[in-house]
Image (spheres, rainbow, N blue to C red):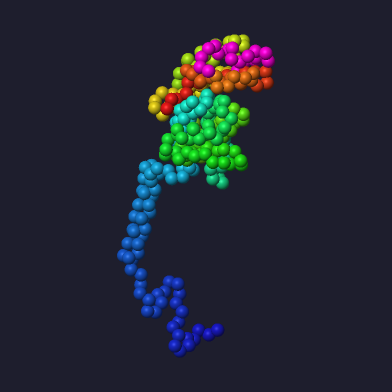
Amino acid sequence: MSGAVQPGYAPPSRPDQQAPGQQAPDPRRQRRLVAVTVVWAVLLAGLTWWSVRHDPPTVKEQRSLSQAGPVVDRAIGELTAAVGTAGVPALLPDRLERGCRVTPLDDGVSLERGVEVATGDDDVREVLRRVADRLPPQWRAGVSTFDGEPLLRADAGDFVAVEGRSGGPGRVLLTADTGCRPAGDGYRAPAADAAAESAALARALGRWGGPTGTVQVLTAPCPGGGTARTARGEATVAADQPLAAAFGTGAAPVVDSADRYARPGEPAVLAERVDGRVRVAVTSPCRA
């Protein structure tokens, strides 16, 4: 191919050459664009820093377990207060489950705390409805049907879900659950003195030779101040030993059978015979 230029066509320019009719770039304008870009990047970084430290989280994945744990604790206190005369409540040990997925790349942890309620009423829906009616209005508690069974659902705030359902004959289970979220600083269960409950538990278990295993003390803050407290333990019991005899006199029991005993009061007591042992919970619940 010859280097001759055909008439009517401009010769091609090299990359370092300015095309015919094209203005040379203005160095001052380029510097202004660079400066604007740098300022915008700094401003965006500053706004991000401020948002992370001051704006409230908007999704569950932004709230750590250490932030959600106290919400769960307060919800458990509310639930014990909401039980009222519907049954005899007792705090359950918390359940921490690790290894769930916050995102496809990030592991998380979930916390569930619960309250078991012994009731002499076989109408679980009515018990759940009475509990729902006593919960804070902002929780929007209601009772529906799921898989043919009554289910209480409520929102305790900060993406903490509250549920209530049947836990078997004469038993209702109320729970507060964080769902999977970042661990943060982890969960620390609230601590409180449960001397009266522990002493009552020791007296009851002493009737059967004393506790076998560790005695657990569980607490939760009450909505009006104070704490709900449960002391839990178990002992070996012969099949012919009645449960009621270990608890002396008091209020009329809600349940009194060969294998289960539940009585309201200060404190309330709940006992259940399982595989040759009796599990006992002594509780001072929150009061509405």
- Pick the front one: 60 or 43: 60
Q: Quadrant of residue 258?
A: top right
Q: Identify the image quadrant of the C terminus.
A: top left
Give x and y (percent) for residue 86.
51, 28
- The residue segment tinted magenta is 234-252
- The secondary structure making up most of the magenta span is loop
Instruction: Check the image and report above or below for 14 versus 89.
Output: below
Give x and y (percent) for residue 58.
43, 45
The answer to whether one can see residue 178 in this image is: no
Instruction: Check the image and report above or below for 281 versus 203.
Output: below
The answer to whether one can see residue 20 in this image is: yes
Left/right placement of residue 70 relative to residue 149 reads left
Going 39% across and 25% down the picture, which residue do you hit? 225
- Pick the front one: 222 or 117: 117
Instruction: Check the image and report above or below for 256 versus 155.
Output: above
Going 45% across and 40% down the picture, which residue do you hit? 140
Going 38% across and 52% down the picture, which residue do you hit? 44
Q: Is residue 237 magenta?
A: yes
Total marks in image: 0
